[in-house]
Image (spheres, rainbow, N blue to C red):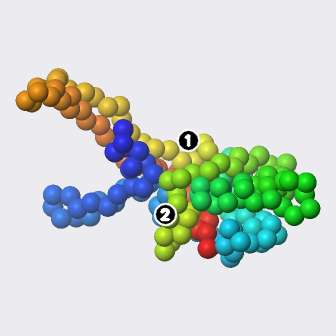
Amino acid sequence: EKHLSQVAWYGYNKANGSGNLVKVNGFLNQEGVTVVTAQYDWATATIEQVLSDFNTSLADSENLFDADVSVQPDTYLMASNQYQSLSSRVVPDSGGKTFLKYLEENNIFTTQGKPLTIRGLGRSNGKGVANADRSIIYRRDPSCIQFKCSDVTFLAAQPKDLDIKFPGHYKYQGVWLKRVDSLRYLDHA
């Protein structure tokens, strides 16, 4: 399970027996995906600057999917370093509203009545370009993105010294991005 989790999130590069490089993409390192770079450090930026970066990461997605709501992003997995920072900073003159709450209420998707779930993700801290925190904006739908893996099959128990081992096997193909326009990354400053 741990191995499959690693492959699902990060993929891997490995040379096979004949010396050829085998590359399996994970959720955080898909190829051909739009990567937006944040212009501001969210730990010190104003709410207007954070909202600008946040909306920029969503802004042209509508052009990419040509108003096809079946691939429109609906989930925003924010790097937990950024999520924690925004959830603890308070917008001035707001009566105690956090930056995160302000983003949830005022982003360009929400103001147009489009659903957008925002969650924190610790696995994406330092996984962007130049070790930047990476947020993932995507359509949470198996017709857009899917992890392909067969069931784990366990073999007969094999005693070894005082231990009993239960070997198993499975096949996997990594994360299959069916619609490249349904996923994008935001790498933080």
Residue wearing tag 2? 127
First reached walking from the N terminus: tag 1 or tag 2:
2
Residue 172, x across and y down, in percent: 35, 43
Front: mark 1 or 2: 2
Query: Does the rendering let one see residue 69?
Result: no
Figure quadrant of the N terminus? top left
State the SS at label 1. loop
- Pick the front one: 122 or 175: 122
Q: Determine the residue positioned at 72% across, 56% down.
A: 88
Count residues near mark 1 (Cα–Cα under 10 Å), then give few for <14, some for 14-19, many for 20+. Answer: few
Identify the disc placed on residue 175: none
The quadrant in which residue 155 appears is top left
Query: Does the rendering let one see residue 98?
Result: yes
Q: Determine the residue positioned at 77% across, 46% down.
A: 115
The quadrant in which residue 169 appears is top left
Identify the disc placed on residue 142: 1
Q: Is residue 7 left or right of residue 78?
A: left
